[in-house]
Image (spheres, grey):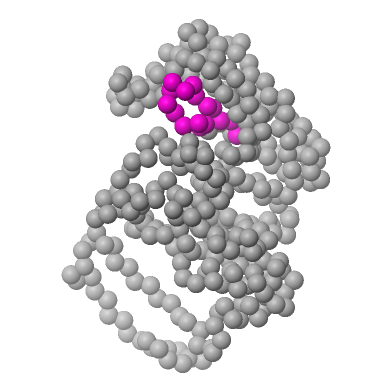
Amino acid sequence: MYGDCHSGTPLSFELDYTTHGVAPSSHPMLSLGWVDGTRSSFIERAVATAKHSDVTVVYANDFETENFDRTSLLLPGDQNELIQAVAKANPNTVVVLNTGGPVLMPWLGEVKSVVEAWYPGQDDGNAIAAILFGDVDPSGHLPVTFPQSSEQMPTSTKEQYPGVDNQVSYSEGLDVGYRWYDSRNVKPLFPFGYGLSYTTFKYSNLKINTSKFSLGQVFVTVDVTNTGKRVGAAVPQLYIGDPQDASEPPRQLKGYEKILLNPGETKAVSFQLNARAFSIWNVKSNNWTVVYGTYTLMIGSSSENIALAGKVGITSGFKSNAALEWNPLN
């Protein structure tokens, strides 16, 4: 339905909607919206505003629900074109993403910064304003990997994503998510665990304690220093690289901590690892098994940015029975 309607003028309409003849599996939906009837487009108006602004903030979003899968990692509609046009008009452009997963960013090199807000809820505006105005230090880290392109994704075939004839092939094996990128030495757009801050941090003095080795416990400590000029929260992440005989991905997250630091302050962060952290799933025995050998313990701010690393040898003196106490298939 098309027509002119001035502000404050009621408009009556009738909508007939039926799902007759539609398969239930298709999840039919109905959306109701409106389009501004002015001559200039939304993008043209946004560009005109951006040219006369000190800073522009562009909100972009994706629509997701349990009823259907995304068919692409591109932002829907003309949002990419909007961002590129605004960024060209004003170099001080910030993009805020209200999305539930990774998106492609063909305009990344043209904007000053990007804030991944996810779906923060009804206080979204206040939360983002606090970040943009610097009242709060952003300290979140990505729980997923953002690829550079659709072809770079682990699920790059149609059979894997979005599927063929409502069937999806999970053929990546152990290399799920960031493990796939690491195992193939592929550099994504943003790695798993990535996150920026208004301050900077330094990791130092990595220590590995095996005093309770016979109890199946290994302790890891690292010093974290705020090397910037304002209060901020760091998120040191502990990854483990298994022995080659384990045939596991190069590194896997085993722990992380969030720590608030004043400028110049240093705090020690501790991790406790048990036998499960050094275990793999043994298909033959249908249980968790510790593979004896040399493990690499890595500390970093993301799966890609490893700052410190140390070695620990797991031998027959290590109490590995704790790894066998939980069997999800029993």
Image position of 164 (left or right of 179): left
Image position of 274 (left or right of 19): right
Return the x and y of residue 29 as percentages of the image width and height. Answer: 32, 68
Which picture quadrant has residue 176? top left
The N terminus - image quarter: bottom left
Return the x and y of residue 27 as percentages of the image width and height. Answer: 29, 62
Q: Residue at x 36, y 56 (%)?
A: 69
Return the x and y of residue 98 as percentages of the image width and height. Answer: 53, 60
Confirm whether residue 178 shows in the render.
Answer: no
Q: Is residue 139 above or below residue 327?
A: below
Q: Residue at x 63, y 60 (%)?
A: 109
Q: Which residues are magenta?
A: 237-252
Return the x and y of residue 81 as percentages of the image width and height. Answer: 54, 71
Q: Is residue 172 above or below residue 125?
A: above
The C terminus - image quarter: top left
Of the pair 60 and 9, the residue shown nearer to us: 60
Q: Residue at x 63, y 77 (%)?
A: 47
Q: Is residue 111 above or below residue 163?
A: below
Q: Residue at x 21, y 63 (%)?
A: 23
As for residue 243 lying within the magenta part, the answer is: yes
The number of numbered badges drawn on the structure is: 0
Image position of 192 (left or right of 287): right
As for residue 42 lying within the magenta part, the answer is: no
**Farthest left residue in view:** 21
Confirm whether residue 108 shows in the render.
Answer: yes
